[in-house]
Image (tube, helix red, strand yellow):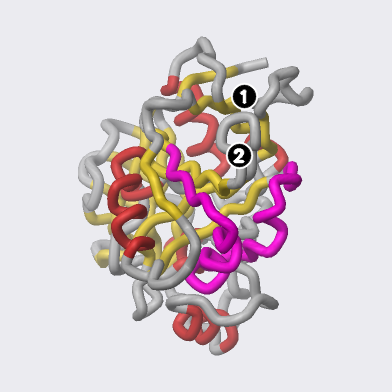
Amino acid sequence: MPSAPLPDRGLVEVAGPDRAAFLQGLVSNDMAPFGGGEATGMAWSALLSPQGKWLTDFLAFEAPALAPEAILLDVPRADAALLVEKLSRFRLRSKVALADRSGEIPVGAVWGEEPPLLAVARRDPRLPAAGWRVYGTALGGDPADYDRHRLGLGLPEGARDLDRDKTVLLEAGFDELGGVSWEKGCYMGQELTARTRYRGLLKRRLVPVAVEGPLPPRDAPVTLDGATVGEMRSGRDGIGLALLRLEAARAGALACGTAVLRPRVPDWMRLPAAAA
């Protein structure tokens, strides 16, 4: 089974009796299953600005062996301090304590057909093929292997693929990949997220692309017949993600610098039907 440590990931601990209710009113996914210390799954969720734009995202889970009476948030390590700072602004009288535990608990990933036989492993809720996150165990392997794996699946990785205070969740697949609850109550940024979905306002999507030629840098313009239709995001070894206008996501070939990008829309992604 392939495995890799994920040194670019960290953990934020949200402890205290109000932990689930506190997060429930702030983040995009349903935190109601957590808070009792017995949840065995995970939830992918995001913290948004009041205007409904992405600030950071994380995988939420419980692991009493690592942090009793707490919810742990697996977040890009570079965003851990920011997440603590943003959440702390809303603590008010809630009985919660926030701590950045990045570096204290190893974070890793395994993927393949069988679950890992490790004490703290949680299935990545976004796609079955994504595999499992593993905590508290130092895994062998190369982080680049996991990076290729998630790029091929079309899974975004924090600020490498999303723009803080600019990205709308549905551009990055949060709907199809289960990162938004449409049934829970209000949360910060809910209005724009719901309006984007129900009014069909989405114009761009983050799409996996095969890269022929040198890997373009982040933000390099992507063009179709000379017109700019998107921007490059992260990538490596002939595969990447690009933020593309919907019409470009269906194109056979796009230009990006001296490279050719070929969109590879995954099976899980739902794009609006092409205009007649």
Q: Amino acid at mark 1?
A: Val
Q: Residue at x 55, y 81 (%)?
A: 186
Above or below, comparing residue 169 to residue 183 in the picture? above
Q: Residue at x 67, y 29 (%)?
A: 121
17 is within the stretch colored magenta: yes
How crowded is the residue under tag 2: few (<14 C-alpha within 10 Å), some, or many (20+)? some
Q: Nearer the viewer, mark 2 or mark 1?
A: 2
At which x and y percent is residue 81?
29, 47
SS of the residue under disc 1: strand
**Lower sequence index among marks 2 and 1:** 2
Question: In the image, is 87 to the left or to the right of 251?
Answer: left
Nearest the viewer among 163 and 203 is 163
The disc label shown at residue 110, or none: 1
Question: In the image, is 40 to the left or to the right of 166?
Answer: right
Tell me if residue 233 can be seen.
no
31 is within the stretch colored magenta: yes
At which x and y percent is residue 208?
48, 47
Give the main secondary structure of the magenta stretch. loop
The disc label shown at residue 247, or none: none
CA gap, disc 2 to disc 1? 24 Å
The disc label shown at residue 68, or none: 2
Q: Residue at x 38, y 62 (%)?
A: 87
